[in-house]
Each structure stands twice: as structure tokens, then as C-alpha cells.
Amino acid sequence: MTATYPVTRPGQRTPAVRRSRRPGSAQVRWVVRIVSVTLVLGVWEVVGRQVSPLFLPSPSHILEGMVDSVVSGELPRAAGSSLGTFAIGFLISAVLGVPIGLAMGRSRVVEHTLDSFVYALYVVPTMAFVPLLVLWFGNGTVSKLIIVVSVATFPIIINTYVGAKNIGPSMMDIGRSVSAGPWKNFVSIVVPGSLPFILAGLRLAIGRALSGVVVGELFTAISGLGGLLMTYSNQLRTQLAFGPVVVLMILGISFTALLRFVESRVVAWKETERHSDER
């Protein structure tokens, strides 16, 4: 028996491509997300109305508390203070982390010099440094920024390092075959090839930077969302204490979604590959 194979005409999609682009899958993902969130909030609402609000206020009570905090101006002021610290600390982390990670990935001397320090500082809990930072820099803005940078920089370094390290010799040979110099190869091959890893490191750094902001506000200057959370908790106003937590969640989700949007535009080929694998 002679095997027959389908002939693909020019411009005709193969079955695999049609499967990877089947309509409705994005809508299904959003429906699942909305249903799951609605279900959790519904169960929380029912349970929250059966227990004391001191221990677990319901989502409707939390929303009422957030409205009161917004009207009084406490929540917007605290969010603005925390957002400023986060933005400056995250920017510093990115400016430091990306070049260091690229240098470690492409230079064995830099890699062997820094890798021990990077991994050692990455695994040490931030709380261990807070007393020393307060002793050295006081309990003001500088200490908060150092805490944010210390927790957000290392995910960026490690992910960028892995991305630059994964650029194989064959890719570099392509650049050398067209007489491209080391700097040209670095700019045109290493940096674009590392972009998915860099963006993944930046997404991880968002959550760690927000955590660093809260730690800095709790244990240095009692300000921002962390300070507001401590104040409400000490006053046993649990209904209001959830407000800063919700704002932090919204900030984290929003910044992560923004980076995903940037990734879909900057490294569109990687995004297409990811969606094909999911389907």
C-alpha cells in the first residue's frame, strides 16, 4: 500500500496551524477566570457573614471600608507614597540587574566573580538586613529604596543571566560569518535572544518589589500602604486593613499585565509559540 500525504497549496494552512489558531480559546480562558473569581468571592461572602468581621470581613464590607478610606483620602495618599517608592526602586533594579545579568551570561570571568554573591544574597531573607539598613541609613526613604532594590534586582539578574547563557555558539557563528564584531553580535543576537528571559525576570521582580515596599514601610518609616495596614491592624479595624492589601494586589496584577503586553509586542514570536503550546 502506498502512503498518501495531503498536499498543501500556497497560502493554505496546515491542520497543525489551524489547531493552534482555533477560535474561542481566549474567550474560554477568560470565562474560566471570571467564573473562578466569582465563585471564590461568593463563598467568601457567605462565610464572612457567618463569622465576626473582626476575623474575616466579607468582600462587601471590605469594599465599604475601601470607599470610606478613599473618601477620607487616607488610601490614595498611602497608595501614592508606595507607588513612588516602588517605581524608583523597580527602575533602579532593572538598570542594575539587566547589564549585570548580560555580563555574567557572556563573560566567564564576570560569571565566576559574581555568581556566589548573587545566589547568596538572593536566598538570604530581606528581614535579616532591615536592622542593619536602619542603623546605617536611618528609617527614611533611602532605607526603603535599598530594601526594594535588594529584593527586586536578583530575579532580574538571574533570569537575564540564564537567557544570555542560552545563546549557543551556533548563533554567534552566524554573526561572525557576516563579519560582525563582538559588539554587533551582542546587540543584534545576545540582547534580542535574552529578551524573553529579561521580561520574565522583570515580571518576577514586580511582586518582590511590592513586597519590599511593604517591608520597608512596616519596619522603617511607618508610611504608605504598609504603614496604613499596620495602623488599621493595631486599631483592630480589619474591614479597613484589607484595603491596602487589595490595592497591592491590583498594582501587582496591573504591572504584570502591562509587561505581558510589552512582551507580546517586543517578542511576538515567543508569544505566538507560547499560545501554540498552550493549545
Image (cartoon, helix red, strand yellow):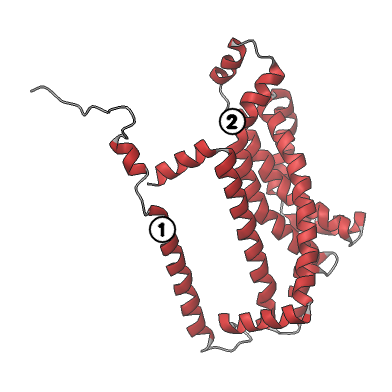
**Earlier-in-chain disc, 1 versus 2:** 1
Work out whether residue 217 can be spotted: yes
Picture layout, residue 51 above or below residue 90: below
Residue 45: x, y in percent? 51, 82
Residue, disc 2: 193
Secondary structure beneath label 2:
helix
Residue 167: x, y in percent? 58, 26
Amino acid type, residue under disc 1 in the picture: Gln
Between label 1 and label 2, give the one nearer the viewer: 1
State the residue at coordinates (65%, 37%): 160
Amino acid type, residue under disc 2 in the picture: Gly
State the residue at coordinates (74%, 58%): 212
> Mark 1 touching mark 2, by CB under 8 A?
no
Residue 46: x, y in percent? 48, 84
Tag on residue 221? none
Cα distance in 3D space between marks 1 and 2: 31 Å
Residue 56: x, y in percent? 59, 82
Quick one: 92 or 147, which is closer to the camera?
A: 92
State the residue at coordinates (69%, 35%): 101
- Local packing at callout 2 (Cα closer than 10 Å; few below 14, some 14-19, many 20+) is some
Quick one: 181 or 122, which is closer to the camera?
A: 181
Secondary structure beneath label 1:
helix
Picture layout, residue 30 above or below residue 168: below
Tell me which corner region of the image, top left, top right, bottom left or bottom right, holds residue 120.
Answer: top right
Tell me which corner region of the image, top left, top right, bottom left or bottom right, holds residue 140.
Answer: bottom right
Work out whether residue 58 can be spotted: no
Residue, disc 1: 27
Question: Is residue 154 rendered to the left or right of residue 49?
Answer: right
Question: Is residue 112 rendered to the left or right of residue 178?
Answer: right
Quick one: 136 or 252, which is closer to the camera?
A: 252
Picture layout, residue 264 above or below residue 106: below
